Structures are given as structure tokens and as C-alpha cells.
């Protein structure tokens, strides 16, 4: 499968400049983030080839769904919302949008399977994010066509799945049947 980190968000823009939480809840993509999403869609289509992507999963955060949109549009595929691949809850940006509001903003997405408040109430310890990643790894490895899945997710979830830090709009190929990373360093690289 391919893990794609969402494009640059309003939070990423401000946090990178100041290293302080700017207090933006469920931020949207910046103009650069939209360009990164478009570029990732084009590159993934070229890399995967025709029929190479059959499933798109995305975190319920707005920035992930916005990043998924160009790929879904090009492929004519639905985006399946998967709360397991959400970001590690640690900053204001990790406060999500309630399901009922997401349903208004994203009427083409099926959201009935997620809770109204689908994000945690308090900071999520690293071991909980790693457990979530292990659960997702197990679910994906049970699928025969996991290799044809693109997952639009976040820095912390990708770190939990791979032990690697990647930038906005970048992606990694991951074999969910392979062992998880032996060491995960939660320091920003």
C-alpha cells in the first residue's frame, strides 16, 4: 500500500515558522498544500499505472480529505474514511470536525460509520498510536489487494507504521505483512 502524507495545512505553515501551536482546529490545506495534493495525484497515477490503485482511504481530518480529492477525481473512486489512520492527537490541529458537519462539507463521502466526535479527548500517548497502527496493519494485511490501496494520512501515523518521517505531499510504499519498525523516534526530523 501507499501511505501519502496530506499536503501542507494552515497549521503546518504556522508551526514550521514558529514551532508553536497556532491553535488552528482541523486546518484546511494551504495553496501549496493543494498543489502538493495535485502533484501527488499525478505522480501516483504515473507510478501505479492503469488499474494500479483500486482503493483510497483517508483520515477524517479535512486536510486529508482535501488531499484525497484530486486522486479520487482522476480515478473516479470513492474515498473511504478511516478513523484509524488519523493523526496522533497532540495539538489544536488534531481537534477534528464533528461527523454531522463533515457530512455537510463532504456530501459524497460515507461517514455514517464514524462517531460524531471521532478524535480523542486528550493527548494520545505514542504507544496508543502505535497500537492503532498495528490494528490497521492487521486489517490491511488481511486484504488480497492491499498493494492497490492509497492511504491519505498524517506524520504521526506514518511514523507509527514505518518509523520514518516524511514531508507534506510525500509518500512511502508499505507492506502491511512485514514486521512493524523496531524503533520509532517521535522527534521531528
Image (cartoon, helix red, strand yellow):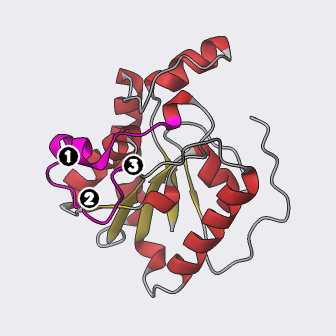
- Where is residue 75 drawn, in percent x and y? 23, 60
In the rendering, which numbered label is found on residue 117? 3
In the visual, does 146 lie left or right of 16? left
The foreground one among 180 and 89 is: 89
Mark nearer the viewer, 1 or 2: 2
**How far is mark 1 from mark 2, CA to CA?**
9 Å
Cβ atoms at labels 1 and 2 below 8 Å apart: yes
Quadrant (top left, top right, bottom left, bottom right) of the C terminus? top right
Q: At 36% from the left edge and 71% from the top edge, which residue is drawn?
A: 52
Cβ atoms at labels 2 and 3 below 8 Å apart: no
| Residue bearing the label numbered 1 | 106
In which quadrant of the rendered view does residue 36 lie? top left
Mark 1 or 2, nearer chain start: 1
Asked if the magenta segment contains residue 10, the reply would be no
Asked if the magenta segment contains residue 110, the reply would be yes
Report crowding for label 3: few under 14, some 14 to 19, many 20 or more residues within 10 A (C-alpha).
few
Mark 3 or 1, nearer chain start: 1
| Magenta stretch in the rendered image | 94-117
In the rendering, which numbered label is found on residue 84? none
Mark 2 or 3, nearer chain start: 2
In which quadrant of the rendered view does residue 141 lie? bottom right
In the visual, does 112 lie left or right of 174? left
Q: Secondary structure at mark 1?
A: loop
| Residue bearing the label numbered 2 | 111
Q: Secondary structure at mark 2?
A: loop
The foreground one among 139 and 76 is: 139
Amino acid at each position: 500500500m501507499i501511505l501519502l502524507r496530506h499536503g501542507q495545512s494552515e497549521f503546518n505553515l504556522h508551526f514550521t515558522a514558529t514551532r508553536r501551536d497556532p491553535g488552528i482546529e482541523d486546518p484546511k490545506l494551504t495553496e501549496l498544500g493543494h498543489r502538493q495534493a495535485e502533484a501527488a495525484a499525478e505522480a501516483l497515477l504515473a507510478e501505479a499505472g492503469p488499474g494500479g490503485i483500486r482503493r483510497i482511504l483517508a483520515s477524517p481530518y479535512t486536510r486529508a480529505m482535501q488531499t484525497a480529492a484530486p486522486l479520487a477525481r482522476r480515478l473516479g473512486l470513492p474515498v473511504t474514511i478511516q478513523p484509524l489512520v488519523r493523526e496522533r492527537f497532540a495539538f489544536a490541529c488534531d481537534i477534528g470536525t464533528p461527523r454531522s458537519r463533515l457530512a455537510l462539507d463532504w456530501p459524497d463521502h460515507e461517514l455514517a460509520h464514524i462517531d460524531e466526535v471521532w478524535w480523542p479527548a486528550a493527548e494520545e500517548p505514542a504507544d496508543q498510536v502505535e497500537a492503532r497502527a498495528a490494528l490497521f496493519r492487521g486489517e490491511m494485511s488481511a486484504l488480497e489487494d492491499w498493494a492497490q490501496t492509497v492511504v491519505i494520512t498524517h506524520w504521526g501515523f506514518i511514523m507509527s507504521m514505518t518509523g520514518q518521517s516524511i514531508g507534506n505531499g510525500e509518500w512511502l510504499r508499505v507492506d502491511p505483512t512485514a514486521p512493524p519498525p523496531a524503533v520509532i523516534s517521535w522527534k521531528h526530523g
